[in-house]
Image (cartoon, rainbow, N blue to C red):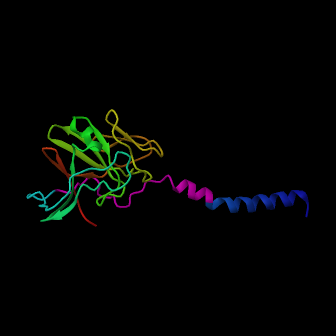
Amino acid sequence: MKRRDFIQTSCKYALLCASPFALSTLQSCEDSKADYDDNNEPYVPPIDGGGSSGSNSGGGDNTGGGDTGGGDSSGGSGTYLEYDITSSNLQPLLAVGGSVATGSNAADPNGFLLYRASNTSVLAFTRRCTHAGSSVGAFVNGVSTCPSHRAKFDISGSVVGGPARSALKKYNTTLVGNILKVFYVES
């Protein structure tokens, strides 16, 4: 076999071997829409507030790890997680404009992105980036950023920059005093 033929054959085989890796790398940057097809339709809490007996108050950590629990509660016709925003890791929510990123919980494996919108309301979104599924951070100056590919979301959950093309999933909430309830649909 001549040298030229050897190099041509070797290059063809090298290209064939590298193709699957190159394709998998390109596919990892596609939007992931699984479980978020209807992300603009938040769960509407029942009129009676979902009734709960024996739920814990508490909160998760700011780092996104562990159970943010706060009482996985279900009863009546609604399911929610309950948080006491006076707990040390949720204290940024005591002030309007404060934001916290919680860890995994029964409603969302990526955790919640919470934002104090007014004296009477807290907004709740999934932390799951709609681009590649990474967990976004807390809002800073009204923008939450994904650490993986720098997708950016505003306080309404809408995309304001980066590769993401769809809004964050939103959860309905109620805030009574210092008790925050985040409503979700069990799957």
Please provide percent x and percent y for residue 55.
18, 59
**Which stretch did the figure color magenta?**
21-44
Please provide percent x and percent y for residue 19.
65, 59
Please provide percent x and percent y for residue 9.
80, 62
Front in this rendered view, residue 105 or 41: 105
Q: Is residue 170 above or below residue 14?
A: above
Q: Quadrant of the C terminus?
A: bottom left
Taking the image as drawn, is residue 156 in sight? no
Q: Residue at x 12, y 44 (%)?
A: 177
Q: Quadrant of the N terminus?
A: bottom right
Q: Main secondary structure of the magenta part?
A: loop
Please provide percent x and percent y for residue 160.
36, 39
Q: Residue at x 13, y 60 (%)?
A: 50
The quadrant where residue 70 appears: bottom left
The quadrant where residue 90 appears: top left
Front in this rendered view, residue 143 or 57: 57
Front in this rendered view, residue 24 or 65: 65
Q: Is residue 133 magenta?
A: no
Front in this rendered view, residue 4 or 175: 175
Q: Residue at x 48, y 44 (%)?
A: 149
Q: Is residue 31 magenta?
A: yes
Farthest right residue? Answer: 2
Q: Residue at x 8, y 58 (%)?
A: 48
Farthest top residue? Answer: 141
Taking the image as drawn, is residue 106 in sight? yes
Farthest left residue? Answer: 48
Residue 140 shown left or right of residue 172 in the figure: right
Residue 133 shown left or right of residue 115 in the figure: right
